[in-house]
Image: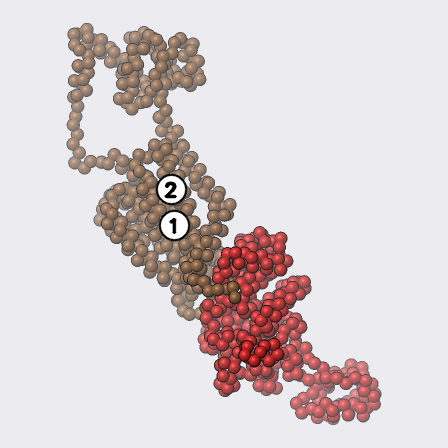
Chain colours: A red, B brown
Amino acid sequence: MLLAEIVLGDDATTGPAAVASVPMNELAVRDPETTGPTQTVPVLEIDRVSKRYGDVIALRELSFRVRGGELFGFVGSNGAGKTTAMRIVLGVLSADSGQVRWHGAPITFETRRRIGYLPEERGLYPKMRVGEQLTYLAELHGMSVRAARHAAGQWIDRLGLGDRRRDEVQRLSLGNQQRVQLAAALVHDPEVLVLDEPFSGLDPVAVDLMTQVLRESADRGVPVLFSSHQLELVERICDRVGIVADGRMVACGTTAELQTCGTSQLIVDAPGAAPGWADALTDVSVVRVDGSITVLQLGVGADDQAVLRAALATGPVREFHRRRPSLAETFRTVIGEQNR
Amino acid sequence: MTGADISGSRAVFLVARRELRTRVRTRGFVLSTLAMLLAVAGYLGLMTVFTDDDPSTVGLAPQHAALVGPLSAAAAERGERIEIREVTGRDAAQAQLRDSELDAWVTGSPDTLEVLVREDLDTGLRTALVDVAATRVVNAQLARAGLNPQQVQQQAAAAGVQVTSLEPVDPQRGERLVLSFAVSFLLYLALILYGTYVAQGVVEEKSSRVVELLLCTVRPWQLMFGKLIGIGLFGLLQLGLLSGAIAAGASLTGLLTVPALSSLLWMLGWFVLGYFLFAGLLAAAGARVSRQEELQSVINPALTILIVPFVLSVFLLGDDPESTLVTVLSLVPPFSPILMPARIALDVVPLWQIGVSAAVTIVAITAVVATAGRVYAGAVLRTGSRVKLADALRPM
């Protein structure tokens, strides 16, 4: 499968030629469904960002965009470059080349302050009280003392930490520390959220709470970019997903779009079929036979209608459907293509 | 949008306020400050006990009422403070001696004085009494020989030796040396202590990874500067309390007759300069490591630099605080922050030297803090093994 085929939507900016054809002002995409013709949805753009550490190339012209109001799941194997990309967005790391833009303008130190960040390596002052810590971080982001205290209190209550407000962070369980960490990302009412593995180490209740909070932020128009290894979760909650491998965005689109580009399988239940009934079909291979059910893998030149006719020729057909691959399967396929 | 832009000074202020607040509120601060104040009070208390100068109370039997004048005079001549009152009757005197209301009871015949004490007769008091008795005998003999005892006494007193000194010794020299040593010792300890706090604070932020979160909203130099100021104020507060206690205690107990307060105020001023010079170095050193366990090895060079001026002040100042070597060294960092205030305590420094030394030190601070800021910014986000200086100065 060709790389170009699986890069979908408006993120087909893998080569210089493709990017050159997209004018700058168009990058603030108009959303015809939710906004009027003059309003634009803000977009966080990562444009051809490259980064190398010595001999190791971490990012190779990585490009993608996250629109306001969108939950964007960032998936990839360990060491694919997710954390590096996020740290570059936050400015704690500088890119060798490429640009990060927000509202169409290159991101600066001042605009970065309006990002809420949850670093992969969690970080809080262990000996500072929960409430004071959040108030301090909010003040550092420019809030007045009163507004900072108010916001800290709100997030503490919202995340179910009401009775731990005066406790030192180090006295909290790891799960609760994670909640404080999320509150630290949200306390200054950020315009953009960048969360590195926010779901790792959370119990199911906390996962639901985290999902809810991220969804609420997106509903307020905030672009939410987060990375995760939990592909089922990403598939369930994300509006769009980007798969990164070896420092490149290898697939990017809605989950539905990604499913169509995974491998295509047909499930056929033909009780009367003899073994080998499908062997003569062009570009079709049998994945497995399970009783009367045959799972077929369709190649590029395969014709599903020819498969149906062949199945009917064997007798009755009880089931005939195309199987949508899960994100995990798509992920394996795409990564497999990469490694080939 | 509530996350408005904040100015650099506001960021520095917020960081400094956090440092000061979290430190002042700890039990460790309260306890260590109380312990320091108790140590000062205890030391001064002990010194007062050992240099006991309570007046001795002497009781005189009624037949010795005439001794009041000569005895007071003899005691005053020796710097002994005594209280004299009349006590009648041996029993009453014994009771008062046992109750320590009386140190000695003088009775007996006018020619042979008898002194009753509880345990032992104070040497000063003994010589005073012997003197009084002797004078009485001499006076009696003079009178018998037809001479006026008072005239003879005055003439004897007028005879003496006149001493002319080529290099007069400051009678307060000893006290000043003690004060000077105290100043350089306190400064040495304080610079090590608060400088180490800075390095530990830097590593704490690095090892807890909170620095990555902070640097998304403040610049590295703001974080470093805020930390320096916050811990510096904390140190100034603690050192100030200690200096106040020393000055107040020394003057209340009369242990120091030289004005200690001005020397201690100069010390506080030089603490600020020395602190920025060394703590800047220590912040940069601390930023190179990610774990407290590795800290000692990177801050040792800076701490070693501190030992030199302290040792020099101990060895050179007692000898000659105005020698060319000492004078020149006290004008330049890294010696000035300890040598200069130690010399000021000896009262041998003209004002212009203080000015030159402070100006040179401030120039050095500017250079050190600027370089330290670059190393800090380059190293503080590189976690893992120790960051080489050359790497810290390269962009990430």
Chain under numbered label 1: B
Horizontally, residue B106 falls left or right of residue A33, namely left
Question: Eyeballing the image, is A45 above or below A308?
Answer: above
- Viewer-closest of B385 and B163: B163
Task: Check chain identity for marks 2 and 1: say if they share one.
Answer: yes
Q: Which of pointers 2 and 1 indicates the residue nearer the eye?
A: 2
One can see residue B230 in this view: yes
Query: To which quarter of the image does residue A336 belong?
Result: bottom right
Q: Where is residue B198 in the image (x, y as percent from the top left)?
A: 43, 54
Q: What residue type is labelled 2?
A: Ser
Quadrant of the snapshot with the C terminus of chain B? bottom left
- Viewer-closest of A299 and A235: A235
Q: Position of residue B194 (x, y in %)?
A: 42, 50
Question: Eyeballing the image, is A15 above or below B378?
Answer: below
Q: Residue at 65% across / 74% down in the picture?
A: A235
Chain under numbered label 2: B
Looking at marks 2 and 1 on the same chain, the residue that comes earlier in the sequence is marked by 1
Q: Residue at 54% across / 56% down in the picture?
A: A149
Tag 2 residue: B243
One can see residue A84 in this view: no
Query: To which quarter of the image does residue A156 belong?
Result: bottom right
Q: Residue at 63% across / 58% down in the picture?
A: A160
Q: What element carries label 2?
A: helix
Tag 1 residue: B191
Q: Which amino acid does label 1 sit on?
A: Leu
Q: Where is residue B151 in the image (x, y as percent from the top left)?
A: 17, 14
